[in-house]
Amino acid sequence: QVQLVESGGGLAQPGGSLRLSCAASGFTFSNYAMSWARQVPGEGLEWVSGIDSDGSDRYFADSVKGRFTISRDNAKNTLYLQMNNLRPEDTALYYCAKSTRTVVADTGTHPRLADYDYWGQGTQVTVSS
């Protein structure tokens, strides 16, 4: 069965960095786009970043553009999110998600959470001094 297991969360100071990983199994990882999303208690799920199945295109929410980088290693079935210059407002539970498609979004459109059919259990990121 499909499994997505996130790791790498923790406590970071403002301006600091963390690297999240998502180990995938139970499906052909290289065939699907993947994304990261985050959620603060009491708020809705926010899409953060996505990467196409072959890694050719990467997408970022405006709130993290220039600070976060997404990558994948299809040989290791692993998705990554490098988070730099962290801010207190980045505090959230971070999830990785498997898309039903090979691309994160069609040209000229926005990524849709509805395109994702499997989610991990999440890893907590807390940014505080």
Image (cartoon, rainbow, N blue to C red):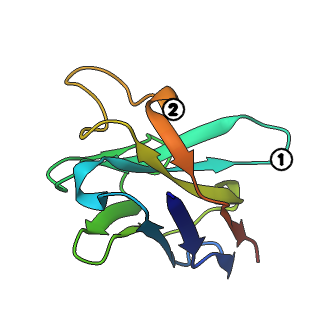
Residue 48: give x, y in percent of width and height.
49, 47
| Residue drawn at 73 percent across, 69 percent down | 126
50 or 87, nearer to the observer: 50
> In the rendered image, which residue does mark 1 sit on?
41
Image position of 74 (left or right of 116): left
Above or below, 1 relative to 5 = above
| Residue drawn at 30 percent across, 21 percent down | 109
Q: Amino acid at mark 1?
A: Pro
1 or 61, nearer to the observer: 1
Q: Is residue 55 visible?
A: yes
Q: Amino acid at mark 2?
A: Leu
| Residue drawn at 29 percent across, 66 percent down | 72
Q: Quadrant of residue 77?
A: bottom left
Q: Is residue 12 visible?
A: no
Dot 2, crowdedness within 10 Å: few (<14), some or many (≥20)? some
Do the residues under discs 1 and 2 have CB atoms within 8 angstroms? no
Dot 1, crowdedness within 10 Å: few (<14), some or many (≥20)? few
Q: Secondary structure at mark 1?
A: loop
Q: Which badge, 1 or 2, comes first in the chain's sequence?
A: 1
Image position of 54 (left or right of 50): left
Image position of 31 (left or right of 35): left
Which mark, residue 113?
A: 2
Quarter of the image that includes the C terminus: bottom right
Residue 56: give x, y in percent of width and height.
14, 52
Q: Nearer the viewer, mark 1 or mark 2?
A: 2
| Residue drawn at 16 percent across, 55 percent down | 54
Residue 14: give x, y in percent of width and height.
64, 72
Tally of numbered discs = 2
**CA–CA distance in space, label 1 to label 2:** 18 Å
